[in-house]
Structure formats: C-alpha cells, structure tokens
Image (tube, helix red, strand yellow):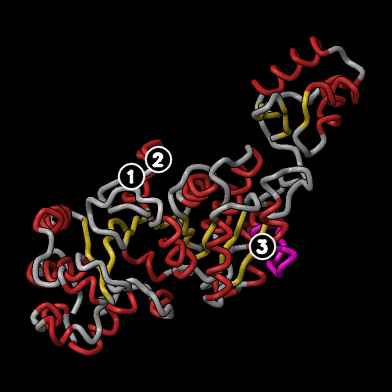
Amino acid sequence: MAINTNDATRARAWVALALWGLSAPVLARLLREFGTPEAVLATPPTRLAAFVPKAALNRLQSPDPERLATAQAWLAEAGHQLITWDDPDYPPSLLELNDAPPVFFFVGRRELLSRPALAVVGSRNATPQGLDNARAFAAALSQAGVTIISGLALGIDAAAHEGALTSVGSSLAVIGTGPDRVYPARNHALAHRLAEKGGILSEFLPGTPPLPANFPRRNRIISGLAQGVLVVEASSSSGSLITARLAGEQGREVFAVPGSIHSPFSKGCHKLIREGAKLVETAQDILDELPILLQASPPSSIKKMLSGAAAQDSGGAAKNTGESAPDENTKGILTALGHDPVDLDTLVARTGHSAETLQIELVMLELQGRIAALPGGRWQIR
C-alpha cells in the first residue's frame, strides 16, 4: 500500500517510528519482524529490546509531540509526500542498499525517482571553469533523458542542478536538512525550481536543522539513487570524495573530470582517476560507459550536442559570447593566460606589457565574459 498524506493514520505511524532515531538497518529488522510501523509501535518495549539499542528504548512510547506535529503539518500541505519501502514509487536503486532509508519526505515529480540517473558532485568553492563544466555535463545528460542527482550545496552541486533543469531529464536534490529547510539560504530560488520541475527528498524529519553530521550521511542516497557518480572538481579533502567512495562500495561507476595539475580543485579528481575512476571529457564518454542511462538512443542532433558538451574544458574550444574576434593584443594575453590560474606578475613576465596596461585589458576581458577573476589576484580563461 502506498503511503501518502491522505492516509493520515499510517503516515503518523511512520513519522513516530522515524522519531525514534534508529538507524536504517535497525528499522529494517523491526519491520521485517513485525510487518508494519503500526505493529512496531504497538510492540512492548521488553520485546523490542532484542532489536533496539538500549539507549533508544526510553524514546519508544513517547515521541516528541512538537516534532511529530511539525512533521504532520508539513505532510498536510499540498504536494508534500511521504514515500516508504512499500510505496511503488520508492526508488528501485535505493532498495539495493543495505542502509536504504525506510521512509523519506519528498516534494516534486515522483516519476523521476525511477528514471536512469547520474550523480554530479564537487567542490563548494568551485572555479568558474568548474561551474561551467558542471552545467554543461548536466545539461547535455539531461537532454539525453538522464536525471541528475546532487546535494543542493553551493558550487558544483548548484551548477549541476541548474544545468539539468534546462531539459527533460531534470534534477533531484538530496538534502541534509528537513524538507522544510533550504540550506544554504542562497539556494532558495533554486530549491523552488527543483520542487516545481524536479524533486527534493530528505530522510530527515521536517524541522531538522543543518547539522554537520547529516550531510555526509545523505551522500549514500545521492550515490545510491544513481547508476554512476561524476566528480567535476574536488580538493583532496572534499566531501564529494566521500560520495565517490560510497558509489564504489555500492557498485556504481565513478567518473572524474581532469584539470590543471596546479589547481587544488583538481587534486581530488586526479586522485580518483589514479584509483580507477574513469577520466571523462564529454557527456558522451559517460553514456558510452553507462548505456543503461539511455532508455532509447538519442536523436543524432542530441548526439552531436553531447559530444561537444564540456568542449570548453581544459582542451578549450572558445565560447560563443557574441563578441567580436579578439585583436592581436587580446589574443596574446589569452595565450599567456593558458588554462591555469595566473597572477598579474606572471602575465607581465609572459607578455612584456606593463602591469597598468594588463589591468585595463584584463578588466575588459572580464566584462566580455572571456576570463574570470579568482581569489588572490589571479585570472583564468572561462
């Protein structure tokens, strides 16, 4: 039987069970033993003691009334949904996991939960090139019908969602707060677009704040929903490497976009590639490795677009910005910039121009969208 907000009694039982704060494996054992959340709730604590940690027994018969009311109020709103293991729309890919969430809160398009999907993750402090790459890969894959999964964080996550929302595959966000919270607040407008055109899901009860421990925990769902994970940019300590590791443990493919050997945001991707992740330069590289992502062959026009996605990578075809062709002086500066972040002193040495002349030229190029200013007084071609 599907759980929805019209089945208020059963929904309340699931929420009360979630309030116990038990791990997914423990909840799974309880449900296998007793059958339904109502039956679990009606079981005496003395019998539950064989399945539930002792510290949790005190919470069994008295769920927090305020948190229960908050969850029920959220579920009462139009479009807010509770999806459980016995719901036909529960994602099949999550059922493969040993620690799949027995219940999660959802808003958006339920059909996306069963679509072929790829997770796209990376640095929160991404470079302009990294953001462009994330959007390009996500848009190309979404055009091919692939749903893009990410975590609604700043940086690569947000760029991937934005790119995917432009086409048919759309995007799902797995968040580390309750479904009634948007974190970070800067992604509020993006969250609304996801709720309308894609989906947002959370295993955490409404009212749950952005607790640090919950973000690594939700990463298993990001990778578990997908057939593979693409890491676009990551430092050697990036949390996206946790998602990549979980993907490998779950039997998912791991892909990584290479970058400059001088960039700290490429070190995580290069580490993954050394460890066996597949180096990719275009969206078509991913589809070639994971044909399951394509329910049907895309039209030739889409194939052409896919092979060109991320053409502005470090191999670097020029963007069509609508500006006139650069003059020789501008070409010289762009050549001197190369593909790595460069500071002003280095550009002076490479071009022979004065610092004053270069500063004027660099500002003009930034206004034209050809280059981006980076922290620390450095510049990089977009």
Q: Earlier in the sequence, mark 2 or mark 1?
A: 1
Q: Nearer the viewer, residue 161 or 20?
A: 20
Q: Which residues are magenta?
A: 272-285
Q: Nearer the viewer, residue 133 or 308?
A: 133
Is label 1 in contact with label 3 (beta carbons under 8 Å)?
Answer: no
Q: Which residue is mark 3?
A: 284
Alpha carbons under labels 1 and 3: distance apart: 33 Å
Tell me if mark 1 has few (under 14), some (14-19) or many (20+) residues whose alpha carbon lies within 10 angstroms of its own: many
Q: Nearer the viewer, residue 138 or 102?
A: 102
Tell me, yes or no, whether the highlighted magenta stretch contains residue 280.
Answer: yes
> Where is residue 376 shown, x and y percent of the image?
68, 27
Q: Which residue is mark 2?
A: 187
Q: Which residue is mark 1?
A: 182
The kind of secondary structure element at disc 1 is loop
In which quadrant will I find the N terminus? bottom left
Is label 2 in contact with label 1 (beta carbons under 8 Å)?
Answer: yes
Tell me if mark 3 has few (under 14), some (14-19) or many (20+) residues whose alpha carbon lies within 10 angstroms of its own: many
